[in-house]
Image (spheres, helix red, strand yellow):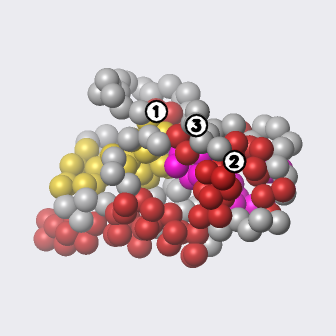
Amino acid sequence: TMLSKRFDGIAADTGDVKWAENANVGVMPQDTSECFPNDENLIEWMTQWRKPGDDDQVVRGILGRLLFSGDEIGKSVKVVSGGEKGRMIWGKLMLQKHNVLAMDEPTNHMDMESIESLQIALEKFDGTLIFVSHDREFVSALANRILEIKPDGTINDYSGTYEEYLRSQELAG
């Protein structure tokens, strides 16, 4: 996808992305398999991403908000589900306190409770959110600008909600 080309080291055909000087970009890739190369438990994996000054309680608090029980934090990252890996990546992004988030299909493999939790957190996020998603409810809840990339490469830049965008397409069609 477009986000993979920008963030996963896949070369784009043309163009550049230039970020503002103070942009601190966090990425949630569609394929999270490479994010967990070592056999470590959830608390160990999450601890490596904490900021200086964050203690174990901060990490445990994040894991709790991600719906991991006290018993589960000792589980190996090698045996967690795809949805649990997505929640772990989201926790990493929360610990790192980015002001720009780029998320490629963030709801893939997540159950409804996890999706709702992620959606609520993103509604409170006070930064820039760039995401690709086929989850219409997720898009409807969060999008306030739509960039539609058409098969011929042209871009339709629509400022408004997803529902407004759909209505505009019906009127145009």
Q: Nearer the viewer, residue 81 or 87?
A: 87
Q: Is residue 124 above or below residue 30?
A: below
Q: Which mark is residue 56?
A: 2
| Residue at the (50%, 72%) spot, across then down | 116
Region of the chain picked out in magenta, as a range: 77-94
**Could you tell me the amino acid type at mark 1?**
Arg
Q: Position of residue 135 (x, y in %)?
A: 46, 67
Instruction: Point out the image quarter for the C terminus.
Output: bottom left
**Could you tell me the amino acid type at mark 2?**
Asp
Residue 169 magenta-drawn? no
Residue 78 magenta-drawn? yes
Q: State whether residue 153 appears in this view.
A: yes
Q: Using the numbered discs, state the Cα–Cα distance from disc 2 to disc 3 in whole angstroms.
A: 10 Å
Q: Using the numbered discs, state the Cα–Cα distance from disc 1 to disc 2 in whole angstroms.
A: 33 Å
Q: Which mark is residue 6?
A: 1
Q: Position of residue 167 (x, y in %)?
A: 19, 72
Image quarter of residue 87: bottom right
Residue designated by label 3? 53
